[in-house]
Image (cartoon, rainbow, N blue to C red):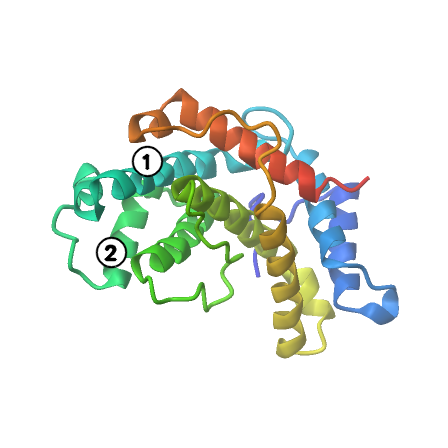
Amino acid sequence: MGTSSARWAPTGKLWRSARGAARRYLAPEAGGVAAGEVVARYVAALEASPGEEAPGALAAFRLTRKAAQNFGAWAGAALSRGRAAALADWGLPDLEGQPPEVMAQALTAALAGQGFDLESEVARSSLASLLLQILSPSSPGPADGSGPEIPPSTDFPAATWVQAFLATALYQRLVLDLGGAMEAAAGGLGQLRAGLEGIKDWLGQAGTEGEAEAPAIPASPEQWRGLAGWVWVTKVLEALLSRVGPFA
């Protein structure tokens, strides 16, 4: 497994602490820790990492937040005007009627862009897993362990799916950064899978909690793609990071 936060594995006291927690999580005989502590120590390490905006975990998710805005805009349009109209908004009028996998792949590229950095890759992977859920109503959730399953809300489905996307992206980033430490400590593939499932479930539960003073949910695709959408997505991600960490 690789690393999503730098070309080389990130270093420093907090990163060593995060990797140590990841190892102990799958090695209880060494003084095991809970899934929540692994996530919290990971967020603490992200908080101390330099970014383009400023040091802090939010800086590690700038492109992810932009993709979240676009996802909210598309989902909102699909709910208000129908899926075909929403696909046309993103230059994909011929996708309606295609298999869900084809629609999810093309729509992911439109909403998350074509960047080749690791953050972009994670955003696309996270978004594709959720779009496949939306476009395949009979599917109970991601079957590949790609991220937390958070069912859509009947009140604010677009906003709830965006929350699910942010939680999924955080999960996938954690796996890229700490997966190597967990893999080394695991007694086998089954134990590794079970450990990752525990982290995924824990993050999924955290992602369903309230937005902690988030502003009003954007009411239209235009608001989702504008300043209102950026502020809402940022506040919701900030609230999620605050709930799951950091760990001093």
Q: Position of residue 233 (x, y in %)?
A: 48, 32
Q: Position of residue 71 (x, y in %)?
A: 36, 41
Query: Which quadrant is the C terminus positioned in?
Result: top right
Calculate the distance from the C-alpha at mark 2 to the C-alpha at mark 1: 17 Å
Q: Secondary structure at mark 2?
A: helix
- Report which quarter residue 22 is drawn in: bottom right
Residue 218 visible in rendering:
yes
Q: Which mark is residue 103?
A: 2
Residue at the (69%, 47%) spot, across then down: 42
Q: Position of residue 200 (x, y in %)?
A: 60, 59
Residue 177 visible in rendering:
no
From the viewer's side, name the closer residue of 240 and 16. Answer: 240
Circle 1 is placed at which residue position?
Answer: 73
Residue count near mark 2 (Cα–Cα under 10 Å), binned few <14, some 14–19, many ≥20: many
- Report which quarter residue 31 is drawn in: bottom right
Residue at the (61%, 60%) spot, across then down: 201
Residue count near mark 1 (Cα–Cα under 10 Å), binned few <14, some 14–19, many ≥20: many
The amino acid type found where label 1 is placed reads: Ala
- Residue at the left extreme of this rendering: 94
- Residue at the front extreme of this rendering: 155
Residue at the (47%, 68%) spot, across then down: 144
